[in-house]
Image (cartoon, rainbow, N blue to C red):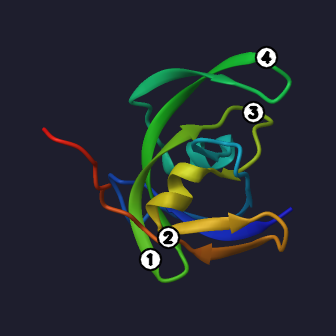
């Protein structure tokens, strides 16, 4: 298990922020912000989305946007607004937005090689 320290900020009031540890979960699409942070920052949802869990169960959660600071970088990202008992997870959408990947064997975060496009073969 790999944990990272993130600073989560409200997009509407950057003075409102919370620093917390998040479990890196390469199987999670979105980052999950625990309900205590959602409440403290007054985060608002943009829409509701269905998600599949590892056990096959489907749940619905609200999705919103926050500013995430990791090490020396900061950017706005979509996140799941956690409900009671939801743990803080750093998902692959946020990891990839920061140009990072998880090495599951060494349990470390490293910079990934970013691509802007691919070359396609054949006539148009």
Q: Residue at x 62, y 50 (%)?
A: 91
Q: CA distance from mark 2 to mark 3?
A: 24 Å
* Left-right relation of 46 to 29: left
User: Of callouts 1 and 4, which one flags the residue occurring earlier in the amino acid sequence?
Assistant: 4
Quadrant the N terminus occupies: bottom right
Q: CA distance from mark 1 to mark 2?
A: 6 Å
Above-or-below relation of 75 to 94: below
- In the image, which is nearer the foreground, mark 2 or mark 3? 2
- In the image, which is nearer the foreground, mark 4 or mark 2? 4
- In the image, which is nearer the foreground, mark 3 or mark 1? 1
User: Of callouts 3 and 4, which one flags the residue occurring earlier in the amino acid sequence?
Assistant: 4
Nearest the eye: 97 or 123? 123
Kind of element beneath mark 4: loop
Kind of element beneath mark 1: strand
Above-or-below relation of 111 to 90: below
Picture disc at residue 73: 1
Q: Which residue is mark 3?
A: 84
Kind of element beneath mark 2: strand
User: Of callouts 2 and 3, which one flags the residue occurring earlier in the amino acid sequence?
Assistant: 2
């Amino acid at each position: 298990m790999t944990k990272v320290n993130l600073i989560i900020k409200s997009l509407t009031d950057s003075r409102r922020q919370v620093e917390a540890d998040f479990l890196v979960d390469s199987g999670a699409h979105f980052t999950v912000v625990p309900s205590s942070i959602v409440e403290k920052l007054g985060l608002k949802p943009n829409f509701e989305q269905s998600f599949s869990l590892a056990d096959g169960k489907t749940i619905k959660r609200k999705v919103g946007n926050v500013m995430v600071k990791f090490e020396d970088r900061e950017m706005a990202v979509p996140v799941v607004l956690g409900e009671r008992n939801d743990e803080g997870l750093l998902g692959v959408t946020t990891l990839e937005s920061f140009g990072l990947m998880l090495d599951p064997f060494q349990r470390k975060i490293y910079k990934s090689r970013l691509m802007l496009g691919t070359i396609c073969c054949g006539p148009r």
